[in-house]
Amino acid sequence: MKRLIIALLFIPFFTNAQYKYPQTKKVDTITNYHGLNVVDSYRWLEDDKSVETREWVTEQNKVTFNYLDQIPYRAQWLKRLEEINNYPKYSSPNKKNEYFYFSKNSGLQNQSILYRQKGLKGEAELVLDPNKFSEDGTTSLANFSLSKNGKYAVVGKSKGGSDWRTYFVLDMSTLQYLPDSLSWVKVSGVSWQGDGFFYSRYPTPEKGKELSTKNENHQVFYHKVGTRQDQDLMVYEDQLNGQRFHGVFTNEDERFVFLNISDRGKAKDGNALWYYDSQSKDRKFLPIFKEPGDFNYDFIEEVNGKFLINTNEGALNSRIVLIDPLHSGKENWETIIAEKNENISSISSVGGKLFVTYLKDVTSRVLVYDLKGNFEREVKLPALGTASGFGGDRDDSFVFYTFTSITFPPTIYRYDISTGESTVFRKPEVKFNPEDYITDQVFYPGKDSVNIPMFVVYKKGTTLNGKNPTILYGYGGFNISSNPSFSSTRITWLEQGGIFCIANLRGGSEYGEKWHEAGMRLKKQTVFDDFIAAAEFLINKKYTSKDFLAVQGGSNGGLLVGAVMNQRPDLFKVAIPQVGVMDMLRFQKFTIGWNWIAEYGSSDNAVDFKNLYGYSPIHNIKSGVNYPATLITTADHDDRVVPAHSFKYAAALQDKHKGENPVMIRIDVNSGHGASNLKKSLETTSDIYSFIFKNMNITPKFASTNYSIEKKPF
């Protein structure tokens, strides 16, 4: 890589319409990609720990929050968000021996509190209050895993929204921490076996390099309760393939130990699966599926020494097969549940049954089978929406699940396995009347005439005259489906006459692997075309118009927003790209960005480079264009999509954008890829909604109460 520093341009301030943005120096670093020189003027912003970058962040936040502070109804919107969110929220109970564990948020607590009770009618006992983990409430409970006998639990803490975890061990009889403390844990579950557990971590970095640890050589250890971390037994590592993920897990009775290996940094979208039998003398991993490739193999359950596996090999919508690990050749596979027209979204084994959730036009259908694959019944859901949960053990007689939809608040049901009856276990007390709103599922034609589903929700009585403030949300990637679900924060948007739309773009899992493959790697432009087609559909059908349309997306969805506003700046009034992947030529250089090569490709490959360079948000901003009013959001502790993506994108956009629309970046502190607590989440939402309304020249109607909002420190 050849670097050439051409110039340092210090601009005191530049004026774009009435907005003055902070100085952003240019240091033109040139990199040659397959014969083409590409200029990177803001690479210095990648060092988010440098004094210069921190000063830049401070100045950008000053401009942004000064702008937001002048919106007269911003504080009112935050107050309304707090009001509508101030109701008790529960998780589904999780049974472990005599106790049921669940989390509860009384309303506006920054972190939900973990409780347990003996039986379903016992008195709740506080187990952990994450609000006391830190003074500012930004350290969260990221993992809680009980040992099989319920004697111990692993408590994983995340500081400031980071993906890094620190593991502790809690004595469940005294609810006191033991001396155990495990550091540098990332991309890790917890699987107990006896008086210890398996977990994954990265090597301890050299002293003084903690903040720049490479995220390479993912190792698996076994930790025995009551010992120091440096005494842990290394179970597996692969130094020759440093950019692989390794995870070890056990089956329910802890007899079989499985090793899962993925290699997405080499564009392998599937996984390898190894195992050993703890009853054997030689506890050496043996391959079931030796190397990561293009297919997924997910363990479900052990049946008489054989394994039920969910796989998409030979079945793009997935199927369930029974495999003898000693004779795992495909000629020996027994198909237990064949592939259907609908995609399998989740599978669980509880009470001797298989609960298989399918997606039919993006809504859940839950079918119950016995372990031999014989169909027994369908779980009767209350409406079209999203069902999740169904977790438990082999001897359970009932199971809990949660059902939600866009206008159906998350409700917990208890399902009796023998009778097939569902009863409401806990219903939320949110002050919201779903009868006041309409949810349409529409199908619109993509650029290639393929029908794309989209959910559109709005208040009854809304006139479709093209003047309704509308948010179009999308993701479209990583085989993730944008299922219909309830959001209490979204209510405040709908109350003000807003329309909210979720486009189910290709690249997701809505219709199986075929749908995913249609929007990944060299076909990524299809996702952007689908999103643009959704906007054009909403405008043509008079739901809204270009003057009242905002686009929003986070992470891969932030990339989506950045790409489409470059390609069609005329189509949207407001753009909200959140924690987006904006530099498609260098994303693999940061933290675990190499993990996304399987989805995007890599600029190290000539064919991939041409494709990536053609849509990379940072590299396709044109000078002199009046881009939509833009509020970029990111956070200083985002170690998944590092904030440098948003920093560089904001600098480039502010430099080239010409027009009256504001182009600003909101940088949260002590937060990560998502808000680190409820307060920060509500503040961000209030700022986004207020920014959208201001730039659409709409004044919301709130009760005439005087509110004040805490100003952000810079």
Image (spheres, rainbow, N blue to C red):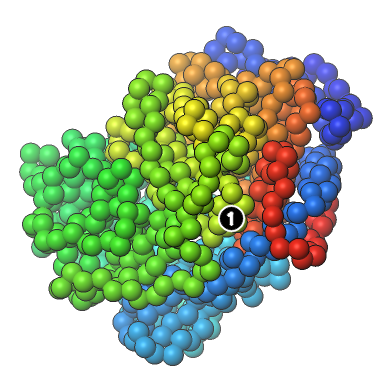
Depth order, front residue of 393/420: 420
User: Alpha-carbon neighbours of circle 1 within 10 Å: few (<14), some, or many (≥20)?
Assistant: some
Q: Is residue 559 left or right of residue 241?
A: right
- Callout 1: SS: helix
Q: Where residue 518 sits: x, y (%)?
A: 36, 28
Q: Residue furthest top?
A: 35
Q: Residue furthest bottom?
A: 123
Q: Residue at x 67, y 42 (%)?
A: 692
User: Looking at the figure, which quarter contains the N terminus?
Assistant: top right
Depth order, front residue of 39/560: 560
Q: Residue at x 27, y 45 (%)?
A: 360
Observer able to see residue 432 = yes
Q: Where residue 53 sits: x, y (%)?
A: 78, 40
* Vertical order, 510 against 298 (above or below): above
Q: Where residue 249 sits: x, y (%)?
A: 33, 59
Q: Residue at x 86, y 32 (%)?
A: 18
Q: Is residue 8 left or right of residue 434?
A: right
Depth order, front residue of 575/642: 575
Depth order, front residue of 274/232: 274
Q: Is residue 159 left or right of residue 337?
A: right
- Residue annotated with mark 1: 495
Q: Where residue 99 sits: x, y (%)?
A: 36, 83
Observer able to see residue 243 = no
* Vertical order, 531 against 412 (above or below): above
Q: Residue at x 51, y 65 (%)?
A: 432
Residue type (three-letter) at the residue carrying disc 1: Glu
